[in-house]
Amino acid sequence: MPWCETCSRFLNPNSLEPDGSCPTCGRVVAEPGEAEEVPKAPWHFKLLLVAVVVYLGWRLVQMIGWIVT
């Protein structure tokens, strides 16, 4: 996250000027086109989501069976 020494604040990469300068004071705080890589979700988080969906699906089947009988 870019930091402007003159303004003493962090800047959102989307709020920077196209040349990487601070919109308030004009000081260059980042390289133009510099983008941070978005981390991917870990495999165990995806496994947890699958397990939750299976569990809730099974509980739905049990509820329908309880209502029918």
Image (tube, rainbow, N blue to C red):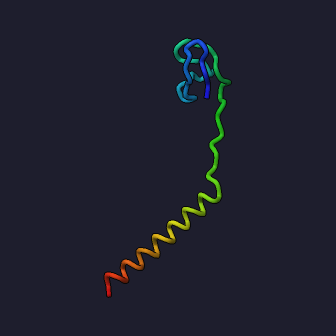
Residue in the foreground of this view, choosing between 27 and 69: 69
Within the image, what quadrant is residue 29 found in?
top right
Specify whether 58 is left or right of 3: left
- Residue shown at 46%/70% (left/top)? 56
Residue in the foreground of this view, choosing between 32 and 64: 64
- Residue shown at 53%/26% (left/top)? 15
Quarter of the image that includes the N terminus: top right
- Using the image, determine if residue 39 lies above or below residue 10: below
Q: Position of residue 55 (x, y in %)?
A: 49, 71
Within the image, what quadrant is residue 5 found in?
top right
Specify whether 6 is left or right of 67: right
Q: Position of residue 66 (x, y in %)?
A: 35, 82
- Residue shown at 56%/16% (left/top)? 8
Quarter of the image that includes the C terminus: bottom left
Residue in the foreground of this view, choosing between 13 and 33: 13
Within the image, what quadrant is residue 11 found in?
top right
